[in-house]
Amino acid sequence: MPLRLVLGAIFVVHGYLKLFSRSYGPAQFRKYLAGEKVPFPTQTGLAIGVLEFAAGFCLLAGVYARVAAALLAIHVLLALVIVAPKKGFTKLPDGTGWEYELLLLVALLTILLSAPAPYASNLLLGR
């Protein structure tokens, strides 16, 4: 459960920043995606922000946590394939690298492949 809660918080914050932040909101994220040659940067940025925000809340609440983890794992895997090859592995010394994304992917796969907790919200709701 702690892993699910931490990942949920990380993705809620990241999604919020992409959707609503004045300093790193939709316009700035679109520019970043366009610079990385991601197709349809405006639509892709909105989709990523909504996915991270909504799936993060699902992880926090324990509602459809495995579905949320699967969708986020696909998203992080695509980021690793599309954006990460241009970076080195470690974030040191220049602040770039894909080690953080790899850790997120492994953590999401851990949630996806583990059995749901007996106190998960969707189990309490009878789903």
Image (cartoon, rainbow, N blue to C red):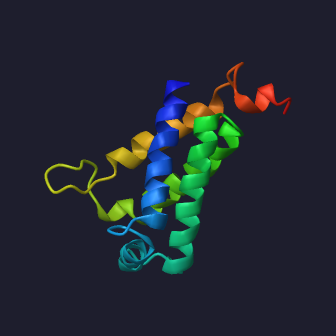
Q: Is residue 99 visible?
A: yes
Q: Looking at the rendering, which quadrant does residue 67 occupy?
A: top right
Percent from the top left, x then y, of residue 52? Answer: 54, 54
Q: Quadrant of the C terminus?
A: top right
52, above or below 68, in the image = below
Instruction: Give the x, y percent position of residue 40.
Output: 53, 81
Q: Nearer the viewer, residue 78 or 55?
A: 55
Residue at 49% x, 57% y: name it. 15
Residue 63 versus residue 42 in the image, above or below: above
Residue drawn at (51%, 79%) of the image: 42
- What residue is shown at x 50% (from left), y 71% (from top)? 45
Q: Is residue 59 left or right of residue 63?
A: left
View extreme (right): residue: 126
Which quadrant holds the N terminus?
A: top right
Query: Could you tell me residue 125's position as x and y percent?
Result: 82, 31
Q: Nearer the viewer, residue 80 or 50?
A: 50
